[in-house]
Amino acid sequence: MMRDLLCAFLPYPWAEKLDVSAFERINASYVGGAGAQRHDDMVWRLRIGGECIYVYLLLEFQSASDRWMALRMQVYVGLLYQDLVKRHKLGRSGRLPPVLPIVLYGGRRAWTASHSLSSLVLPAPEGLGWLQPEQQYLLIDHHRMPSRPLAARNLVAALFGLRRCRSKQAALELLRALGAWLSTEPNQPLRDSLSSWIVRCLRHKLEPIKSAETEVVIMKDKQFGSWEECILDEAMHGREEGKEEGRAEGREAGREEGRAQAVRALLLRLVARRTGGVPPDWEQRIAASSLRDMERWLEDLFDGAAPEALFGQP
């Protein structure tokens, strides 16, 4: 996700060439001189090129414009530098690394705060200007960033687009693309996290609608019992598209097992949601079943069948 964030919003060639292996999450808790502890949102160390240059990414998640953000950023960067010096993490050069401070903003109103610390400070007397502190940050306002084509296959850009979309068709296109991408994503924690986020995002977007059935019908021409079932159905369509792509690329064998694991996990999750848990004999039967049988059971559950009718009384 961090790689896709930089690829989508940094207009530099090196950002588009980054590999996931270049990123390392590091400690983000610092103690200032007065003993006050600062827990930053995220700090990553990034290896760029073959020169072992490290760039630290400092992110601030904001929902409202903050006039003093440039000042806050200077404090956070200072605490980060102090921590690196204290822990002897400066590398062979003994110099401080560059810092990329990012403000990730999702508020409805436009961001009005200054991006520069110098604009928050009164003009200095003659000759003292060069001694004044300066700090800037990169603002990513995902409600006002230009859309990227789905062909670019960028998860972060697609999720931001889902929050911005204003029509059923636009939402469906994004959901189908996300479903197809997630069906081939080997990182299960990432898939689970994104699936949960998508469900919460869609619920939030349609809060004024009271009827659960109406909410689901707005997003799909089929009727489901919950938002989660609707999202799972979209993911199933994505897996079918991924299956055709896999055959064309000659990787069907590996993809088949990956799809079976994904469908099995979805099936177990849906059964547990319907019954409050998965009985051991049901779990064993699902584990030993073929992909075709599991997909058929999922379709039956989507159509309203009771789990007991499919697997028998526990």
Image (cartoon, rainbow, N blue to C red):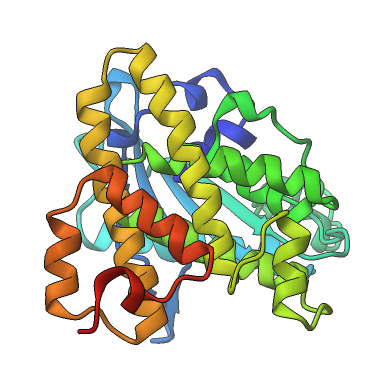
190 vs 309, nearest the viewer: 309
Which image quadrant for residue 283? bottom left
Residue sitting at x 29%, y 50%? 293
Residue 103 appearing in the image? yes
Which image quadrant for residue 275? bottom left
Quadrant where the image shows the C terminus: bottom left
In the displayed structure, would residue 169 be above or below residue 164?
above
- Indicate left or right for 225 with 281 as reference: right
- Indicate left or right for 286 with 143 as reference: left
188 vs 118, nearest the viewer: 188
Residue 68 appearing in the image? no
Q: Position of residue 122 (x, y in %)?
A: 85, 63
Residue sitting at x 23%, y 50%? 89
In the displayed structure, would residue 118 be above or below residue 18?
below
Q: Position of residue 284 (x, y in %)?
A: 11, 66
Q: Position of residue 243 (x, y in %)?
A: 39, 28
In the displayed structure, would residue 68 be above or below residue 276?
above
- Indicate left or right for 296 with 264 as reference: right
Q: Position of residue 128 (x, y in %)?
A: 74, 51
- Indicate left or right for 285 with 207 as reference: left
98 vs 16, nearest the viewer: 16
Residue sitting at x 53%, y 65%? 229
Residue sitting at x 50%, y 27%? 15
